[in-house]
């Protein structure tokens, strides 16, 4: 009996050796993506809104930029603008600042100018006086820490014309100023 068990053990061990020699194939799959830098800036009469980053980004992409703000028109019989929003988005690991330099409203044909003030998120920035020719810098967004991944930021602002300047201004087709809103990165 011992011989039979020994022969069986030898056969089992030999069979394992036969079946252990099976060829196996392996393959690899490399995953690759490149995230391109994205950023955007929209001045609108609405804010980008949403509960998730995807919702905020979708809302940002649906914003309609405004190009002109009117005062004392049939839509707005006031010296103050409706609420406006600076909306900013990026996926870059940077510190961003969104600013503009404001100059008084002027006419292309008259020397009279109209001053105004801008309120950003409830805080009134320095007043733009009618005789200011160098402009006033206003910061809408100033990030203090870098953030990874996509982010969307929105700041609400409004503009209030100087009623005295407006009342003293001479008749002209249009008083205007142009803001160049800049996105700077550190």
Image: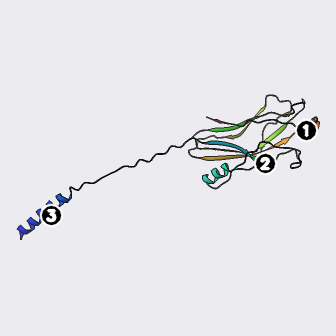
**Residue 116: x percent and y percent?**
84, 38
Residue drawn at the location 64% of the way across and 56% of the way down: 51
Left or right? Give the position of 67 relative to 170. left
Outermost bottom residue:
1
Mark 1 element type: helix
**Residue 177: x percent and y percent?**
81, 35
Which numbered dot is residue 83?
2
Indicate the quadrant containing the C terminus: top left, top right, bottom left or bottom right. top right
Q: Name the residue under label 3.
A: 12
Q: Name the residue under label 1.
A: 166
Choose the circle earlier in sequence order: 1 or 3. Answer: 3
Label 2, label 3: how many angstroms apart (C-alpha)? 85 Å
Residue toward you, 1 or 71: 71
Choose the circle earlier in sequence order: 2 or 1. Answer: 2
Left or right? Give the position of 61 relative to 110. left
Tell me if mark 3 has few (under 14), some (14-19) or many (20+) residues whose alpha carbon lies within 10 angstroms of its own.
few
Mark 2 element type: loop
The answer to whether 179 is drawn above or below residue 1 in the figure is above
Label 2, label 1: how many angstroms apart (C-alpha)? 20 Å
Q: Are the two marked residues, 2 and 3, in contact with CB atoms closer than 8 angstroms? A: no
**Residue 164: x percent and y percent?**
92, 38
Indicate the quadrant containing the N terminus: top left, top right, bottom left or bottom right. bottom left
Choose the circle earlier in sequence order: 2 or 3. Answer: 3
Residue drawn at the location 17% of the way across and 58% of the way down: 18
Label 1, label 3: how many angstroms apart (C-alpha)? 104 Å
């Amino acid at each position: 009996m011992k011989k039979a068990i020994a022969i069986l053990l030898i056969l089992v061990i030999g069979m394992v050796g036969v079946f252990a020699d099976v060829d196996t194939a392996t393959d690899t799959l490399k995953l690759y993506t490149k995230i391109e830098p994205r950023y955007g800036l929209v001045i609108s009469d609405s804010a980008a809104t949403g509960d998730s980053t995807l919702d905020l980004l979708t809302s940002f992409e649906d914003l309609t930029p405004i190009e002109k703000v009117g005062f004392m028109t049939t839509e707005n019989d006031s010296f103050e603008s409706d609420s406006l929003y600076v909306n900013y988005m990026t996926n870059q690991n940077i510190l961003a600042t969104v600013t503009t330099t404001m100059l008084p409203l002027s006419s292309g044909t008259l020397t009279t100018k109209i001053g105004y003030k801008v309120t950003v998120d409830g805080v009134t920035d320095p007043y733009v006086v009618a005789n200011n020719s160098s402009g006033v810098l206003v910061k809408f967004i100033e990030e203090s820490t870098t953030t990874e991944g996509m982010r969307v930021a929105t700041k609400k602002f409004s503009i209030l014309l100087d009623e005295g300047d407006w009342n003293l201004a001479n008749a002209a087709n249009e008083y205007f100023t142009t803001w160049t809103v800049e996105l700077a990165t550190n």
